[in-house]
Image (cartoon, helix red, strand yellow):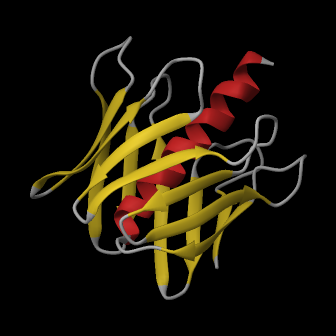
Amino acid sequence: MIACTPASLLSWNFRLTGGGHAAEVTYNWLSEQGRIQAGPETFQVIKQGMLSGTWTLQGPDGVRAKAVKSTPLTRTFEIETSSGPVTLRAESLMGRTMVLLGSGYGCRIAPAHWFTRRATIEGDFRDFPSLCFAFWLTSLLWRRNAQSS
């Protein structure tokens, strides 16, 4: 299990720890871009245009993963990782829990309870930076929902 803990009470930045892994997930102040520090590696999350539904995870060796939001009305991303395609989608219509499935991934990203930003990631994954990217996208949806409330 990987614990996802907000950096502070009102922050949307997270620390991910567990299973011998550690990462920091950071959002840029007023954009849907950011940074992921996974172990010794630093990655940039870049949105491909203001109205685009495409994000890339870029590391020192180029693009590590690419996510495309299927349609603006769903909570589904098709992600191309170095180990193959995966899908990040809402587990149910109303809940905040997301599932990551395909190419060696079978994970569940779930909030600890309704009134917190704390979350956990449970399940199998092949590539920790790509898993962090999936969590980044999940918390982006949570962030958008909180800002629109």
Query: Residue 100's spot in the image, x, y percent?
Result: 52, 57
Q: Nearer the viewer, residue 72 or 133?
A: 72
Residue at the front extreme of this rendering: 102
**Is residue 73 placed above or below 41 in the rendered structure?**
above
In screen coordinates, is 58 left or right of 75? Answer: left
Q: Residue at x 59, y 18 (%)?
A: 73
Residue at the bottom extreme of this rendering: 20
Q: Nearer the viewer, residue 127 or 60?
A: 127
Quadrant position of the C terminus in the picture = top right
Query: Residue 48's spot in the image, x, y percent?
Result: 27, 24
Query: Residue 32's spot in the image, x, y percent?
Result: 45, 28
Quadrant position of the N terminus in the picture = bottom right
Query: Residue 147's spot in the image, x, y percent?
Result: 71, 22
Picture quadrant of residue 53: top left
**Is residue 18 placed above or below 105 in the rendered structure?**
below
In screen coordinates, is 37 left or right of 17? Answer: left
Picture quadrant of residue 6: bottom right
Q: Residue at x 35, y 17 (%)?
A: 52
Question: Total marks drawn?
Answer: 0
**Is residue 115 placed above or below 17 in the rendered structure?**
above
